Each structure stands twice: as structure tokens, then as C-alpha cells.
Image (cartoon, rainbow, N blue to C red):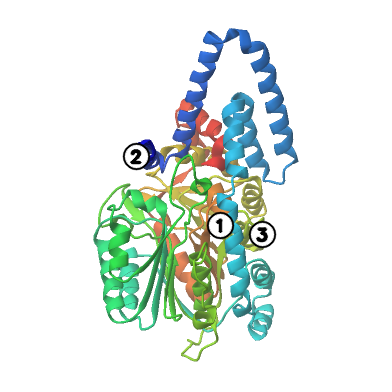
Amino acid sequence: MGKIISKKKKENLKKKYEEWAKILSKKYKDRPMILIIVLVLIQLALLFVIYTKFKSYLKYFTPAMTIITIAMITHIIDKDMNPAFKISWMAPISVFPAFGTMLYLFLHTFPGNKLGINSLKENIKKTKPYLFQNKDHLGEMEEYASEFKGLADYVHKMGPYPVYKNTKVDYYEDTVEGFEALFSAMRQAKEFIFAEYFILKPGKILDEFVSILEEKVKEGVEVRFMFDAISMFNLPKNFEEELKSKGIKVKIFAPVSPFLSTYQNNRDHRKVLVIDNDLAFSGGVNLADEYANLIEVYGHWKDNVIRIRGEAVKSMTAIFLQMWNIFADGKEDYDKYLAPRDGFFPNSDEYVIPYADAPGDGESLAKNVYLYMSYEAKKYIHIMTPYLVLDNEVLTALTFAAKRGIDVKIIMPHIPDKKIPFAVARSYYKDLIPEGVKIYEYTPGFVHSKVVIIDGEATTVSTVNMDFRSMYLNFENGIFIHGKETTESVEEDFQNTLSVSQRIDIEYYQSFPRKYRFFGAFMRIFGPLM
């Protein structure tokens, strides 16, 4: 009898913890810095108790904290990581040794994220034989786009994603048209639909998406749907079960538990939709109504959708399967989806490289794509990004481009979705503007597009924000295109957005309240952890 009572107590405690964890996660899911501040305040309270109630132990406590601080800072200095991350860890450890040390050890030593990353590496190895580089395409690129041959070599070596031709690219600056194209393509699916998204919210967009998936399952189409666990806080409790009951294969990436999951810091930020290994979609949009401006949350939502058809879709299929099979129960039949197949491939002279990036692999591939483009630019670099939290390498690349006469323009939101990261982003204006970088803010609302365009020749459309989280912590994907047709479409979108954006000069920046500027500059210390 005692054992039964004990078991019930354990179940009740577990249930209470899960409810409490869910409340905290939901409350702070978009504001990790607030959660950190709350934890710091808890440590301050504990320190107060120690100093007032246990004074006799202070002679042991203070030296112990000093030793811990010195040991941890020495370890961090010696560790192979970006200097900005080192500063972001050294600051809290110096001020709050107990809290900082526990948080650092938790995120860097627990096996959760390492196991997932190792599993992903194995999946990438399994798909690599299918992602072989067509030597003719590479040779043509060396002849007609030689400045980007090095980028193609790098992405294939480290990705391992090859450069393709025979791929038609369509860029949608109007997300309503983008969603219409996406839904239309889904309705034409004959073999499979693979979908991977970061955010899902109840509404017309998600309802239509799920309705089509359900319809295609009835027609015998294989449907796999993967999304980040962050979305579970927006969705009904039985959402996963409902999808599965309709025959949709579902995977939720990294279920959120704020104190027991090291995956909390590594989210699946990718946007991938693959249909029959023939069509693929990506871009900035998630499955929620604000992305099509059906509802207004931060003014007008500026975003994009990109569609590719042809040879390059194979890399998108591989990218999806690599993630789907993290912690997979069974054995994936990669040959079924990735083996060479006959079919119609559009005749196109553009070079297309779909790519993906993951944390913990020692290679910041997505960031390096941005850097490569910045250093290759000869006329202009035009950027749209919702966030701007830069490491020294990216900051140097942008300012160096401006100093050598390149027209560097960055469009940011004017109405932010997150106030603290926006204050941090604006703190970089004083570093960029005096060096010749032109900053604009999209006055109608919020820019969520992530694009880089250079010289009217090349562009990348991706999920990768200009911040530490995208470049170091999240799972991301993008599509690099060298070709005037697509690049001109993306540049036209940039110019249309620019026409309703406000130029920010140094005088305008200095008109911000002093407290606001100080706050943004101070929070840059924690920028890599946001």
C-alpha cells in the first residue's frame, strides 16, 4: 500500500512540475533574457539569506566562490569558442559565480544537445553519397561565375551540399501569393510531402495547411510533418494526436522543459517543404496568419517565400530527412527518396545551392556564406534582417565593405517583435553608420525576410537572421542563387521595401533616450545568449 501511495505522490509531483515548467516556458519562450534575470534575482535572494542567516560560514563561502570564478574563467578563456560568447559567459560568472557556473555547466556538459547533434552528423554521412557534385556544373561555374566557385567548393565540402543547374527559382515578395503557390503545389503531390517549420499558430494558414495534408493522406500520399516544440504552447493539447489520427507522420523537435532540456537553447528554425522531390519551398514564413498579414501583430509583416523546381530539390529532401531521423526508431530508406530519377528538369542557367547549418558541428556554414558574399561584393550589398546582433567577423566584413566603397544597405524593422533584441540591434547603429553602412527601418511594421543580395548577380534567401542565435545556436537553412533573373527579383523586393523605409543617420540614433542607448549597449554583453 505504501508503495502505491509513494507512486501516486511521484506522479502528482511530476504532473505539478510539468505544469509549472510549461507555464514558465510559455511565459518566457520568446524572452530568454528575462528568465535569466529572474534566476539571477533568485541567486541574489539566496546570497542575502547566506549573509544574514549564516554569517559564520562567510569565511568559507567567499574564498570558495573566488576559486570557482577563477577556475571557470580560465576554462572559458582556454576553450575554443567565439570571443563574444566568452565575454557573455565570463560576465555572469564573475558577478554571480554560483548561478553562472551552474548555467554554463548545464548547457555545456549535459548530453541532450550533443546526442542530437551527433545523430544529425551520422544522418548527414548517410545522405552524402547522394549529394555528389556534378563536375560539369562546377566546371561551368568556374568559367562563368568564377568568384563563387570557392563558395560552392566550401558548401559542398562542409555541408555537403552541391551546386546545381537545371533548377527554376520563383521568389515571392508577397507572402499571400507565396502561400497560394505553396498550397497549390501541395494539392498536386503524388508521392510525398515533407514539411518542417519553426512556428505553428491556430488560424486560417495552419488550418488550410493541415486540411491539405489530411486530403493527401487519403489519396495515398506519404506525409511527414515536423515542427519545433516551441509551437506546442500555441497549439491545442491534442494537436499532435489529431494529426497522427489522420495518418500524418509527426515529429516534434526538442520538447521544451526550461530546466531539464539543454535543447532549449538549440531550436529548429528551418522552413522546408518538399513535394515529390520535384518542388521545394523555403523562405522566412512560418505557418501562422501574421505571415500572410491576415492579422496584424507588429504593423505590416514583411516576409518572403521562395520556390525551387528541378535538380536542386534533392538537397532540400536530404536536409529534411537528416533532421527527421534524429533519434529515429527505424532505418530510413534514403535510396527511395534520393536515388537518381528520371523526370523533367527545367532548363536554367542559374546556379543554385540549397544548404543547411546546425549548431555544435564546429562550422558556422550559414554565417560563412554571408561573409563570403560580403567580401566578394564589388558594387553593393543589400540586406534585410529582423535582428542585428553581430559578432566581430560580420561587423568587420560589413564595415570593411563600406570603407572600400561598396554600397552597404541594411533594412531593419521599425516595429519590433522583441524589445530587448531590438535595443541591442540599434546599439550597433553607432558602429555601422559612421563607417558608411546605411541603415533603414521599415516604417510600416516588422521585417522578417532574411536576404542578402550582391551586385545584381547573387543572392541568398534563408531562415538565417543576422544574429548569434541563427549563426551559432539554431538549426537553419537557406538557398544561394547565382543568376540575374532571381537576383533581380529579390533586389526589386528590396527596393520596394526600401521605398517605405526610413533612413537612420547618426543624429537620429543619438536622439534615442540616453537610458535606451545605454541599455542596448549593456545588453550586448548577453547578445550571444539571446
Rendered location of residue 303, percent (x, y)? 39, 59
The numbered dot on residue 519 is: none
> What is the distance, in whole Å, between disc 2 and disc 1 at their CAs?
32 Å
> What is the distance, in whole Å, between disc 1 and disc 3 at their CAs?
33 Å
Rendered location of residue 356, percent (x, y)? 55, 64
Rendered location of residue 314, percent (x, y)? 52, 78
Residue at x-position 51% and y-position 27% = 40
Q: Secondary structure at mark 2?
A: helix
Residue at x-position 53% and y-position 53% = 474
| 163 or 492, nearer to the observer | 163
Choose mark 1 or mark 3, whichever is in front. Answer: 1
At label 2, the amino acid type is Lys
Q: Secondary structure at mark 3?
A: helix
Residue at x-position 62% and y-position 35% = 89
Q: Mark 2 touching mark 1, by CB under 8 A?
A: no
- Above or below, 491 against 400 in this view is below
In the orientation shown, which residue stands out farthest toward the front?
A: 1
Rendered location of residue 219, percent (x, y)? 29, 82
Residue denoted by label 3: 375
Q: Secondary structure at mark 1?
A: helix
| 334 or 393, nearer to the observer | 334
Residue denoted by label 2: 8
The numbered dot on residue 116 is: 1
> What is the distance, in whole Å, between disc 3 and disc 2 at their CAs?
62 Å
Residue at x-position 62% and y-position 26% = 97
Q: Earlier in the sequence, mark 2 or mark 1?
A: 2
Question: Could you tell me if residue 342 is visible in this image?
Answer: yes
Choose mark 2 or mark 1, whichever is in front. Answer: 2
- Above or below, 361 against 334 in this view is above
Choose mark 3 or mark 2, whichever is in front. Answer: 2
At label 3, the amino acid type is Tyr
Task: Specify the quadrant that holds the N terminus.
Answer: top left
